[in-house]
Amino acid sequence: MSESVGDQRYPGCFAPVRIGNIELSNRIFVPAHTTNFGRNHLPTDEHVAYHEARARGGAGLIIMESLRVHETSLGKPQGLAAYDARCIEPLRKIADAVHRHETKILGQIIHLGRQVDGDALRLPSWGPSAIAWDAAATAPHVMHRADLEAVVVGHVRSAHNVLAAGFDGIEVHIGHGHLLQQFLSPATNRRDDEYGGDEPNRMRLAVDVLRALRDEFGPDVCIGIRVSGDEYAPGGLTIDDMCRIVPKLVAHQQIDFVNVSHSAYHGAYSLSTQIADMTFAADGFRHLSPRIKHSLRANGHTMPVMAVCKFRTLQDAEEVLITGDADLVGMARAHIADPHLVRKALDGREDEQRTCVGCNQGCAGFLEKGLAITCVVNPSVGRERTWSPDPLDDPASTPLDIAIVGGGPAGLEAAWVAAARGHRVELFEAAAELGGQLRAVERMPKRHDFLALLREQIAACRRNSVSIHTGTAFDVTRLSTLDVDHVVIATGASPSVVEFPGGGVGLTLADALAAVWQPGQRVVVYDLLGDWASASVVEYLADLGVSVIYVTPVAGYAWKVTRYSKTAMATRWRAASVAIHLLRSAHSYDNGEFLVEDVSNGELHSLSVDAVIAAGNPTANCDLYNDLVGSGVEVTMIGDCVAPRTALEAVYEGHAVARGL
């Protein structure tokens, strides 16, 4: 067989590799990541379709999401109970689907420990010590000896069930601040028995689990570990600690691979590093796996070492594989965004890849809400049973002539998906360039990754022969000159000026981005939105050296931003000296004086500032829809012209309407 384009371009990625007794065809794997597809603590057909799409897309290995080893680790109803034998048959469906495409699959077994929300089952969380993971959380039950034994037994029972389902091996989670890492870390383990205190004692529970598994299954079952190379938490484990601890862990038992991640479930900065968003440097965590690999090799251990976090393209992966910094590279969000990214590289179609932008809206943000994951870039996530990840595989039964009005993320998504399905599509944009409101991120360096979404949507439109008309308004008169079957309106929303009850108005977010600011100016951002739109402007101004005062009548700041991003945001805002005033409602602004009312007692307070930016709800641009209804042509609205929201909803609605045409 001749070499593929991918083999030639990425010899590191497409070199076969062995982990334990498993042969992998390439070195790209999908790490374990929670999907919230579970129901009644069991896997579902959504899991089957989701993982099969990524196996079909060419991943060499998939590691199934967290499979809980004990009922105190379940938390929400979507948590998967590996200790329950009822999981075997649903897991078998997943393994069979993945194996059909010559991809291997491991099961990650885990006890989450102290951060489990026990409300659904009315169970306490468990932990080594009575230390809550967050200021608003409840301290866990301090585990007794019988609890520790139950955790060890639960790991063995769970591994039996996973292997009985046909999985190729087991990953034991000793990272991300879950239970085994909670025992390992001095930040969370304050015990004075044989499971606390010095390092060997803190390692004891993890060693007990690994020994029990190897004693039960022998040397021929692939068993590896996932660890955090650095907790990034006060008093927590550092990379220097882990370079010492990991070789000691693997010296106790045969370990077939070491998967190096980072972070801990700690209600501060560490949490945001776990699913690092677009504000983090792309290579900010790539020093961890080579450090641990070097420490293992120095101690005579030769098992493969895996690297994860913010690997978005095969080129990113190749850079660490070809140098030997890692032996495999995990790409979780990259595979959420595009399940076929490996196959596209093999086939020389990388220009068709949909790239993760690190927005954390549909993945981490939905997990926090207890919802099944989705993706801004790829709305088919979680819907693989009905929507093929590639619209080309879902041709329209009857090609139509379609006009799409508005070239923002909603309109662009509708245009390329409809065209890919065989419709004849014309796209009309009144502005001189495509992109709509998302073009505003060009002014904000921390949000630049969002531009990849626009670039790839525009490229997909051109690749699928969408006829694009920029600088072209669309109205009833233009409709009369066209022979179209359907008009899709994606005209977005416009900024609204916030008027203060006592007089004065604020600048809109758009005004703020268009203005010229000087270091040292004092500016209020009055936030009624609580989302990334307003939070991004705060950071934009702070990065310019402006003294920012954040004011909101709400009891929290940036309340719509997922805490997986917000804990790092809090660190950045503190470093930039952003002052936060909560429960303060705007009263008036005049001649440099901004009066705010304390909503708890009605007292007025004065802030002397150079400007007030008021982030209010935009106004939907729905006039065109009203004009076209009754024209005899079917008309559909999508995106912000229906109701102003975010790019997540805009892209989804564009995709959904195009799938339905």
Image: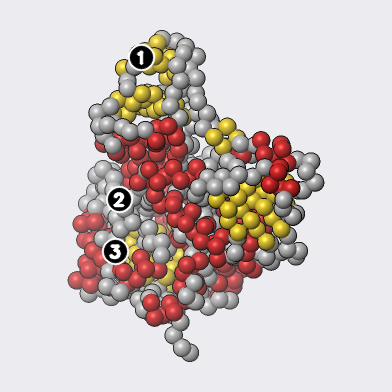
Check disc 1 and report the residue beneath it: 591
First along the sequence among labels 1 and 2: 2
Three-letter amino acid code at the position of disc 3: Ser
Q: Nearer the viewer, mark 1 or mark 3?
A: 1
Place of residue 272 in the rendered image (x, y in percent of width and height, measured from the top left): 37, 46
Residue 508 appears in the figure: yes
First along the sequence among labels 1 and 3: 3
Check disc 3 and report the residue beneath it: 289
Place of residue 57 in the rendered image (x, y in percent of width and height, measured from the top left): 53, 70
Q: Residues within 10 Å of mark 3 (few under 14, many from 20)?
A: many
Place of residue 436 in the rendered image (x, y in percent of width and height, measured from the top left): 52, 45
The dot on residue 231 is 2
Q: How is the image coloured?
A: secondary structure
Three-letter amino acid code at the position of disc 2: Glu
Q: CA distance from mark 1 to mark 2?
A: 48 Å
Image height of 47 relative to 430, above or below = below
Q: Relative to 177, is 370 on the left or the right?
A: right
Label 3's element? helix
Three-letter amino acid code at the position of disc 1: Asn
Q: CA distance from mark 3 to mark 2?
A: 14 Å
The dot on residue 14 is none
Residue depicted at 32% across the width and 29% down the height:
548
